[in-house]
Amino acid sequence: MEEPADVSVTTHVDAPAEAVYDLVADLPRMGRWSPECTSVAWRGGATAASAGARFRGWNRRGPVRWFTDAVVVEADRGRALAFDVKGLGLPVARWAYRFEPNAGGHGCTVTEEWTDHRSAVYRSITGVVINVRDRPTHNRSGMERTLARIKAAAEAGS
């Protein structure tokens, strides 16, 4: 059984679920959507989102910059994409995107989920280092912006 997400944000997109999935699953483009992630690069020979594919993400909040390493744990085109993130080799979070075609073929519903996997100590340290004491509230705001950008790109046919 999957653990419940700490934060979940949903939006409707006037585009097919497969098209929206393709935008999100092109992880090197994540820097276009996310207000915190600036870029992503595949690692270990990976070139696309598939279970087991690894990548590194670079992030920024104000003057603070850091990277995390991730592995795709679910990649089902038009339905779901999820990846587990580690920082300094320690579990950080699971990010997941769910895509549901709407009845009648009018676009889809996209849900972005974040599940915190940090220990209490790691949560406290990272909160101080990047000056985010309330990560769920911070992430909700970022997820809303991320989905708005994905929605705009998908509806524009990008």
Image (cartoon, rainbow, N blue to C red):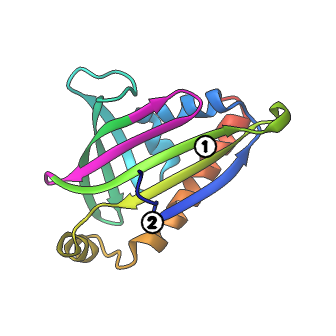
User: On screen, 139 above or below 39?
Assistant: below
Amino acid type of the residue that numbered disc 2 sits on in the rendered structure: Asp
The local crowd at label 2, few if under 14, some if 14 to 19, many if 20 or more residues have their Cα within 10 Å, is: some
Tell me the SS state at disc 2: loop
Tell me the SS state at disc 1: helix
From where the camera sits, is residue 35 visible? Answer: no
Report the residue at 50% width, 29% height from top. 76
The magenta segment is 74-89
Q: Which residue lies furthest to the front in this view?
A: 1
Would you say 103 lies left or right of 101 here?
A: right
Q: Is 153 inside the magenta-drawn segment?
A: no
| Residue 33 place in picture, x, y as percent | 52, 46
Q: Quadrant of the C terminus?
A: top right
From where the camera sits, is residue 50 visible? Answer: yes
Give the residue at mark 2. Answer: 6
User: On screen, 87 above or below 29?
Assistant: below
Would you say 39 lies left or right of 18 here?
A: left
Front residue of this view, candidates 111 and 25:
111
Report the residue at 23% width, 51% height from top. 86
Instruction: Tell me which numbered mark, 2 or 1, is placed earlier along the sequence.
Output: 2
Give the residue at mark 1. Answer: 150
* Viewer-nearest of discs 2 and 1: 2
Amino acid type of the residue that numbered disc 1 sits on in the rendered structure: Ile
| Residue 5 place in picture, x, y as percent | 46, 60
